[in-house]
Image: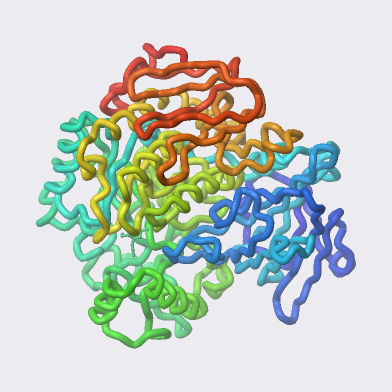
Amino acid sequence: MRQYIFGNPLEEFAVVEETDKIIVTSELADKCPVSNMKWEINVEDGWISFTIPLEKNDIVYGLGESMHGINKRGGKYVSYNTDNSHHSDKMHSMYGSHNFIVIDRGCDKSAQGFCFDTPARVVWDIDVDDSGEIVVVCETCDMRLYEISESSENRLLTAYDATRIFRWAIGESYIPPIWAFGFCQSRWGYKTEADVRNVVKKYQEADIPLDMVCMDIDYMDRYIDFTVNKKRFPDLKRFAGEMREEGIHLVPIIDAGVKVEPGNETYDEGVENGFFCTNMEGKPFQAAVWPGMTHFPDFFQASCRKWFGSKYKVLTDCGIDAFWNDMNEPSIFYSEYTKKTSSIKMLINFISKSAAEKYAELDNNAYKDYRHFYHYINGKRVLHHNVHNQYGARMTQAGGEGLEKLLGKGNYLLYSRSSFIGSHRYGGIWTGDNESTWDLLRTNVKHMPSLNMCGFMYSGADTGGFGGNCTRELLLRWLAFSDFTPLMRDHSCMGTRKQECYAFGDTEDFKRIINLRYRLIPYLYEQFVEAAHNGEMYMRPLGFDYPDDRTARVIEDQLMLGQGLMVTPVLEEGATKRDVYLPQDMEMIRFDGYTFTKSEAAKGWHEIEVPINEVVFFKLPNAKVMVTREASKCTRDIDMNDLMEL
Ligand code: MIG
C-alpha cells in the first residue's frame, strides 16, 4: 500500500501500519503517478479531484455505510455524516463516512484499492450517467490518498486481496465479549426499571433467549450525560445486579452533547478545562439537542477524550459494561446561527412533523452549524466543517479507550451511530434510524460486507426497522437474517407499533428463529474473532470468494460468512421460497427451531422452500462448524466444552 500526501493533513487516524510515503510536490501535482488515475489539485478553491476510468464489467466495492448496492456503480455518494432517517437510494449521506473503494477489474487484471483519507466532505460520482469513470472530489487540499494496486504490491490482486491489504493497514477491528453476540431487545420508550424488568420477564415467559436490553435517553436525568433519573431508576447498581442475575446486560445510551447547566459536574469540568468546541468568539459553542442547549466535547483533543472516557465510570461503577453512543454526527436540532425558536416550540415541531420534513429541516440547520464552530487540533483552531466526518469516530475512540481503562480490553461492549475508518478499532456501529420496510432489510444485507471491508465488523441494523410499523412477517424474516450479524438487536422508535417478539401474539415462531442464533454463537464468535485478528471479512460478497464465477459476482442477496457458511435470507413479502445460487457444491442446512437437517446441493441454481419459522443456509463441504446442542436462554449458559459438529 502506498501513501500520497497532499498539503498538511491531520495526523493519521484511519491507517496505523507503516506505508511507503510519497509527498505530492508540484511536479507530481501536474502528473498523477497512480496508474489509471488522473488528479487535479485546485488550491484556490480548496479541492482535489480524482478520476478513474472503468471498463464495462468492472465492479466497484466499498464505501461502508452508504446506500445503493454492494456494487457501488451507478450511484452518487456524499461523505458528510448526517442524521437523516430517510434511508433510500436518493440519500447520499449516512451517519458514517468510509472512503475506501476496491475496483474489481475481472480475474485477469489486478484489482485496485483506494482510500481517500480526509475528514472533510467528499463527493463521489461512480459512473452515475454511464460516464465510464469514477470521479471523487475531496473538498480539501490537505489529505492522504492510499493506493493498493499491482504496482504497489508486485502481484496481481483480487478484490479480496486488495481489501485484506487495507484491513491489515488500518489495524485490528474491535472485538466485543461473546455475550455481545447474544440477542438484544431495545426500544425508544422504555423509561423505568419496571419497563426493563417487564421486557426480560416477557422474554423469559416466552422462553426466547435474551442477553441485553438497551436503555434509551429516558433513563437519564433530563437527558444529561452520565446522570441517572432517580425516580425511574432509584438504585441502578442494585437493578443492574438484579438483571445480571438473570443473565442480562443493560446497555445505556450516551449522547454527544453535554447539557449547559452550571452545577452539573460534566458541564463544569468541561468548561473549566476548555474541553468544549468553541464558537467564533472563542466561547463554548451552543446548540440544542435532547437536553436543550448543549456544548459539544472537542473529541479531537486527546485530553478531552481521556476526560470524557473516564466519565463512563459513573455507570461502570453500577456494574454496567455495555454502551451505545448516539447523536455524534453531531446531530443538531437548532442553534442561534440557524433557527431562533424556543426549545419547547422546537420540540413540539419536532414530534409532530413527518420524519421526512423533520429531517430535511434538521439536515439544513446542521449543515450551517458545522461552519460555525471550532476544534483545537495540535494547538490550532480548526473549523468543524473541515474535520466533520471524524467527529463521531473520535467520540468512539474516547469511549473505547476509557472503557478499556475502566474494564479491561475485551470486557466491554461499545457501538456508535457515527463513524469514520479508524473508529473500527475502538467499537462497533449500528446503522441508524432505518424503517420497517422490506427494502431496508435488503439494505441491511448489502451494508454488511461493505462495512466489513472498511473495518466495521461488529455491526448490525435495527432489526424490524426503527421507524414505521413492523409486521410479524417482516420481523421474523429480519430476525432470520440478523441471526448471522454480529449485532442482533430489535430496536424501534416510540410511537411505532410495539416490536418485541411477544408483541405479535404467538411467540413460538420467534423462539424458533432466535434459537438458531443461540445454536450458532460458538461458530459465529470464533469466525468473528479470527477474521478480526487476521484482517479478514466476516461477511463477504460471493464475488470475493469466487472471483471468476460471473454469476456469483453479481449476486447481492446472499453472503459468504466466515470460512464455512453462506447465508441466503428471504427478503420478499409473502415469499415462502427463494432462488439461491451455489457457486460450488455445498450442504444445505435447514433449521426448524430445534433440529438441523442436512442435504447435499450441487453447484448452480436452486429454488428453496423457507417457511416463516425456519431458516435455510449453506455450508461448505469440508467446513467444521461447531454449534451448541440446544439453544440456551443466554450466552452465559453456553457450555463451550460440550459442542456438537453441524
Ligand atoms: O433524535 O435516543 O438513532 O436509535 O432511539 C433521536 C433516541 C435520538 C436516535 C437513535 C435511535 C434512538 C433515538 N435517537
Give the residue displayed 62% in from the left and 28% down from the top: 582
| Position of residue 135 measured from the top left corner of the image (x, y, whole percent) | 74, 65
Along the line of sight, which residue is nearer the eye, 145 or 356? Answer: 356
Quarter placement of the N terminus? top right
Instruction: Judge whether residue 360 can be spotted in this image.
Output: yes
Q: Please name the colour scheme applied to the rendered image.
A: rainbow
Assign ligand 1 to one image quadrant: bottom left
| Position of residue 414 measured from the top left corner of the image (x, y, whole percent) | 39, 45
| Position of residue 450 measured from the top left corner of the image (x, y, whole percent) | 58, 47
Tally of numbered tags: 0
- Quadrant for residue 209, please give it: top left
Q: Which residue is the extreme one toward the bottom? A: 340
| Position of residue 294 measured from the top left corner of the image (x, y, whole percent) | 33, 72
Give the residue displayed 63% in from the left and 55% down from the top: 12
Tell me: residue 583, above or below residue 79. above
Tell me: residue 291, above or below residue 533. below
